[in-house]
Amino acid sequence: MRKKCDNCGICYKICPGHEVNFKKLWWHIAR
């Protein structure tokens, strides 16, 4: 589960309870 979070960074959608990696989240939005 944690690997999926790290892969995408949108943890709040993939596995609630994990921290959201804002850096990766921004990267996803910017793309």
Image (spheres, rainbow, N blue to C red):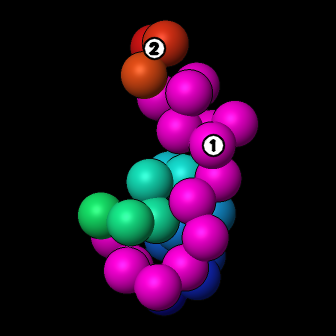
Residue drawn at point x = 55 percent, y = 52 percent: 9
Alpha-carbon span between mark 2 and mark 1:
14 Å
Residue drawn at point x = 37 percent, y = 80 percent: 16
Relative side of 19 to 16, left or right: right
Residue drawn at point x = 69 percent, y = 36 percent: 23
Magenta-drawn stretch contains 26: yes
Residue drawn at point x = 64 percent, y = 53 percent: 21
Magenta-drawn stretch contains 8: no
Location of residue 31 in the rendering, given as x and y in whole percent from the top left corner: 45, 14
Which residue is label 2 attached to? 31
Disc number for residue 3: none
User: In this orientation, does residue 7 appear?
Assistant: no
Answer above or below: position of 8 versus 17. Answer: above
Location of residue 10 in the rendering, given as x and y in whole percent from the top left corner: 44, 54
Disc number for residue 22: 1
User: For numbered disc 2, what is the local secondary structure?
Assistant: loop
Q: Nearer the viewer, mark 2 or mark 1?
A: 1
Circle 2 Cα neighbour tier, 10 Å, few/some/many (<14 / 14–19 / ≥20): few
Viewer-proximal residue, 14 or 7? 14
Query: Which quadrant of the view contains residue 24?
Result: top right
The magenta region covers 14-28
Location of residue 30 in the rendering, given as x and y in whole percent from the top left corner: 49, 12
Circle 1 Cα neighbour tier, 10 Å, few/some/many (<14 / 14–19 / ≥20): few
